[in-house]
Image: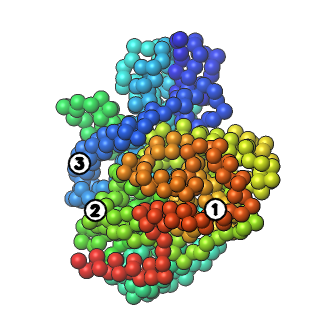
Amino acid sequence: MKKTLTLSKNFSKKNFSYPSIYLGSSRSFNNSNILYDEYFPNIEDKIKGHEFCQKIYNSLILDLSKDLNTLHNINYPLRSWNIILGSWMRTFIHKIFENFSIIDKILKNYEIEEIFTFYPEEYDLYTFNCPSLEFAIVNEDWNCALNSKIINFLDLEKKIIFIKNNENFLFNQRKTYTPKRGITFKILNIIGKVNNYLKKNNYACIYKTNLSFLSEKKLEIKLGQLPQFLGDEKEIPFRPFDKNLRKKINLKKLNTKNKFEEFLRMILPMSLPNFVLESFADISKLSEKSFFPKKPKIIFTSEAFLYDDIFKFYTAKRTQEGVPYFIGQHGNCYFTHAHNNYAPEMTIGDKFLSWGIKENENIISTCNFKIIGKSKLFNNNGKFLAVFPPFAISGQPIFDVPVHEKRSYESGIKILSKLNEKIKNETLARLFATDRYESEPVYHDQIKKLNINIDDGNKSMRSLLKKSRLSFFTYDCTGILENLALNIPTVCYWDNTFGFINPRFVDVYKLLIKAKILFENSDDLVKHIEKNWLDVNRWWMDTNTQNCIKKFNSKINISPQAHSLDYLKKVLNREARL
């Protein structure tokens, strides 16, 4: 059957000659003509795709680092460019590859007669930095601009209808993400600045470690220094896009054998983030004027390697001077999900501090330090807390995110709908509507029709756990590991249970199935919840359940102990002296 392929949901259907299918940001869940397929349907396909993207990354970063060194008249080693640009590059390459692959499969699987698209030269795909790229990846116009370039590159023998957009800039090129700061932050910031002036240049740079605020300050004291407060992030005044500057970068290769790599090298100079080109010198200066120690004995972070541009520049310079660089595990999915096998943070640091896994000499097994100092939260007469994923998590290089987001919500809502009325009346659905993500209205309304209360991210998970007897997670997330490490009653279900799981960790997840925590059948989960609702502890404290949890935690999610901060101190000091 002949089809019209439209690259934006905003194009008028009255102009279509055939029934349409839509390929854009793929997040308008109430639109029936959207393609919702798994284009990487099994773990082997995903791993193959990740490995291909990693090879492309390794080739590109070598050539790009040379051009950037020449452009900025510097001589940064490859490691420094991996620190500065690695997270952005990896996400960008995966996104381009995914869209390129989807278009290729659509053209093979459908009888496409006409394509509605932007003019391919109308927009460049540049972003400001990593947060800006995350906005772009889920933005309708940015995806349309990208897909228009892909269609043009493929030089198809199809009828192409070009549509002019009235906007001069893409959404992500007008806005960057600025975290909201409350009064507590501002007070601590003032106190911290006083301490910062008293610090020594050789203090350890302990920054955004994922430890609780109190635990992080205790760690600094144990390291023999005044607690610092380095979180006064400066807003970067990004300079205007400079096409002539970008023309100085030439990544084309005469012998490029792969069409995807040829396309990527063609669009990359005009797509690179502003922070490595137009604003490079400004951010470099800001990194030297920052409150970070001038000659730190170590650098330790679990988050800033991704989003904090000033920190990345600072770290790139300090590692050139031989300063040991430690990166801690940020959340779940490290090691267990296929895409994290290739995360830059696994290799750009001198050591990676895991929550329990020890796979090679570069990885140090510690504990789930995110919950150090936190206690078990449980109310035997509390609510049933159903936790749904944030939309737009494809800021991470994960294939087939839209279809899995859709399935997580639909299967989660289906499970809630099957619960008896008594449990429904005591259920709270936790969605994620923040200044960065919005809950999907379609599913929001479906949950409300079940007469289930909704929290849109207004309350902290800790406050919700205090009032809950059982937590239900609809996706594989950090919250599951936190709950299991704290021994908080938890169940979970997501479609295609092992679709993202590294094969070598399947047996670890099967321990959760054995404990009746993770379910492969949604009806079995409903029966389990109803059977144990009146006395959750009967199942949770059962010997089999507890033994499975202990075995699971011992392999990937070690629970913190009273001495855990002392052990972290010992690890950091030991490696700093090597």
Q: Secondary structure at mark 3?
A: helix
State whether residue 298 is above or below residue 306: below
Residue at the spot of label 2: 360
Residue at the spot of label 3: 62
Q: Secondary structure at mark 2?
A: loop
Q: Earlier in the sequence, mark 3 or mark 2?
A: 3
Identify the residue shown where x is 36% and y is 23%: 154
Residue 172 is situated, as x and y percent measured from the top left of the image, at: 52, 45
Identify the residue shown where x is 61% and y is 59%: 490
Horizontal side of residue 274 vs 180, given as left or right: left
Q: Earlier in the sequence, mark 2 or mark 1?
A: 2
The answer to whether residue 19 of the structure is visible from this angle is yes
Mark 3 or 1, closer to the camera: 1
The answer to whether residue 434 of the structure is visible from this angle is no
Quadrant of residue 266 within the rendered picture = top left
Label 3 environment density (alpha carbons within 10 Å; few <14, some 14–19, many ≥20) = some
Residue at the spot of label 1: 539
Cα–Cα gap, marks 3 and 1? 54 Å
Label 2 environment density (alpha carbons within 10 Å; few <14, some 14–19, many ≥20) = few
Q: Nearer the viewer, residue 216 or 187?
A: 216
Label 1 environment density (alpha carbons within 10 Å; few <14, some 14–19, many ≥20) = some
Residue 137 is situated, as x and y percent measured from the top left of the image, at: 49, 42
- Amino acid on which disc 2 is placed: Asn
- Amino acid on which disc 1 is placed: Trp
- Amino acid on which disc 3 is placed: Leu
